[in-house]
Image (cartoon, helix red, strand yellow):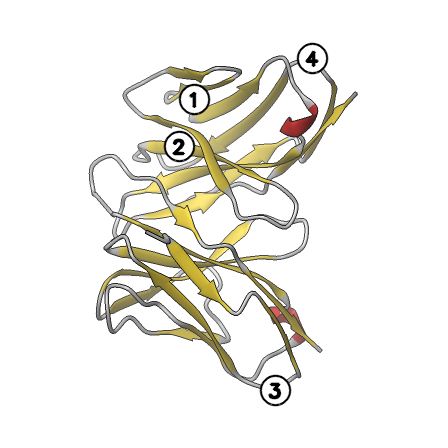
Amino acid sequence: GENVEQHPSTLSVQEGDSAVIKCTYSDSASNYFPWYKQELGKRPQLIIDIRSNVGEKKDQRIAVTLNKTAKHFSLHITETQPEDSAVYFCAVHIIQGAQKLVFGQGTRLTINP
Amino acid sequence: NAGVTQTPKFRILKIGQSMTLQCAQDMNHNYMYWYRQDPGMGLKLIYYSVGAGITDKGEVPNGYNVSRSTTEDFPLRLELAAPSQTSVYFCAANEGRAISGNTIYFGEGSWLTVV
């Protein structure tokens, strides 16, 4: 099955600095790559996604880059703020057979004031 | 439009008991999923359904059963609960368009403890 590796598992940055989380995947047919943010005790919420025909997508302080050749994609958060502290999950959309999302292991991001 | 609704939110079960986690969606989405999330871990797919009457196993189906008699409902049944099933369970739904993938909407989660 699809293997999604996410790094790092924990990340601590100073407020105002940038944070980068990276995911690699194995199935070259995958075509949709969302990122989810999960605050403590809450459900995962979609924050940004990218499709395979695009190399980069930006939404205010958040951006995602995709390298289909190397099979990796990254989440970039700039000018980090305390409310960015959460667990972030990448996911890969599997299209072979029935559709489903396979999630990375998660990154616990802590923003230090 | 409530999205995806799960009940109960919290439950404590004794070893060997059975229970059903309810999930309903009002978005008329074809695809529904059950994930479990162990403490400090990612989401693992238990079962999924591509439409009424169709279900299939995910990564961790052992100890669970599902049914999908209607588009709206996708209950998850735990038979003979075990401590290893202590987890947070998330139901989710998406439209299931084949070409480009769609946003997956999660329910608020059900916290289950087996003692």
Kindly indicate the quadrant of the structure image that contains residue A78. Answer: top right
Identify the residue under disc 4: A16
Which chain letter matches label 3? B
Identify the residue under disc 2: A33
Q: Image height check: is A50 above or below A102?
A: above
Q: CA distance from mark 4 to mark 2?
A: 26 Å
Q: What amino acid is found at the position of numbered circle 3 in the picture? A: Gly
SS of the residue under disc 3: loop
Identify the residue under disc 3: B16
Q: CA distance from mark 1 to mark 2?
A: 14 Å
Q: Residues at marks 4 and 2, common chain?
A: yes
Marks 4,3: beta carbons within 8 A: no
State which tag comes first along the sequence, 1 or 2.
2
Q: Residue at x 39, y 15 (%)?
A: A56
State which tag comes first along the sequence, 4 or 2.
4
Q: Quadrant of the C terminus of chain B?
A: bottom right
Identify the residue under disc 1: A70
Q: CA distance from mark 1 to mark 3?
A: 47 Å
* Residue A25 image position (x, y, % from top left): 45, 34
